[in-house]
């Protein structure tokens, strides 16, 4: 049998991956993905490792007028859930909730591990995390900017209910997608050499 032929490298892909940079949600503006681009982005996001094809995740889209409506509900919930907080501080964070969705599109990736299988929940949650990473990469490939966040709205039970999550579901990530007027300078990156070892037999 002849040896397989290696596919040629894709320099543009590599360069894009090497330059990928998150942009703050507040810095993301229109234009955002149109309906066909959104459909394509979600299809890209779904092409992730998924042991036993359980599809242990789903999407919730927040766009258009829904951005302000959800933000107002989250702000109200934050005030109600934090009555002991000093009023100034409470209003500051409630205001952040009200403005949580500034980008044209937000994609909530919902992790929903499937029970009764041999696949550990942790492995299924990793698959949902891979969906988030594919969304970031896919957004860049489509010409947009994005960021992956979580925070109070992803962890509070009432906030999750407002976002549309059900029993046993968790927010793997809130992905904000739009166009940045200015991409920030790159941040310091890990020293990969310092983090890498090669396996050797245990002593």
Image (cartoon, rainbow, N blue to C red):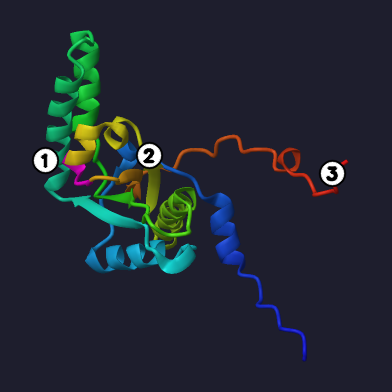
Horizontally, residue 202 falls left or right of residue 191, namely: right
Residue density around tag 2, few if under 14, some if 14–19, many if 20 or more, within 10 Å: some
Residue at 54% x, 39% y is 186
Q: Is residue 7 above or below residue 26?
A: below
Q: Nearer the viewer, residue 82 or 167?
A: 167
- Which comes sooner in the sequence, label 1 or label 3? 1
Q: Is residue 15 above or below residue 91?
A: below
Q: Is residue 71 above or below residue 62?
A: above
| Residue 202: image tag | 3
Q: Nearer the viewer, residue 30 or 89?
A: 89
Task: Give the magenta-colored segment's residue range.
Answer: 162-166
Disc 2, disc 1: CB below 8 Å? no
Q: Residue 76's quadrant in the figure?
A: top left
Using the numbered discs, state the Cα–Cα distance from disc 1 to disc 3 in whole angstroms: 57 Å
Work out which quarter of the rendered image holds the N terminus and state it: bottom right
- Which comes sooner in the sequence, label 2 or label 3? 2
Horizontally, residue 117 falls left or right of residue 168, namely: right
Residue at 48% x, 63% y is 51
Position of residue 158 measured from the top left corner of the image (x, y, whole percent): 19, 33
Q: Is residue 177 in view? A: no
Q: Nearer the viewer, residue 3 or 136?
A: 3
Magenta highlight on residue 37: no
Q: Which residue is mark 2?
A: 149
Mark 2 vs mark 3, foreground winner is 3
| Residue 69: image tag | 1
């Amino acid at each position: 049998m002849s040896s397989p032929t290696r596919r040629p490298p894709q320099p543009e892909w590599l360069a894009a991956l090497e330059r990928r940079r998150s942009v703050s949600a507040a810095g993301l503006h229109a234009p955002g993905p149109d309906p066909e681009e959104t459909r394509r982005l979600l299809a890209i996001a779904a092409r992730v490792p998924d042991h036993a094809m359980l599809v242990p995740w789903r999407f919730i889209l927040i766009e258009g007028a829904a951005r302000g409506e959800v933000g107002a509900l989250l702000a109200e919930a934050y005030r109600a859930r934090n009555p002991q907080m000093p009023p100034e501080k409470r209003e500051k964070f409630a205001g952040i909730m009200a403005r949580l969705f500034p980008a044209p599109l937000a994609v909530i990736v919902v992790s929903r591990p499937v029970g009764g299988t041999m696949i550990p929940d942790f492995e299924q949650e990793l698959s949902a995390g891979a969906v988030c990473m594919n969304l970031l990469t896919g957004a860049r490939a489509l010409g947009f900017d994005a960021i992956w966040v979580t925070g109070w709205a992803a962890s509070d039970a009432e906030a999750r209910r407002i976002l549309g999550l059900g029993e046993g579901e968790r927010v793997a990530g809130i992905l904000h997608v739009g166009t940045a007027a200015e991409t920030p300078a790159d941040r310091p990156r890990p020293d990969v050499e310092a983090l890498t070892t090669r396996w050797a037999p245990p002593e």
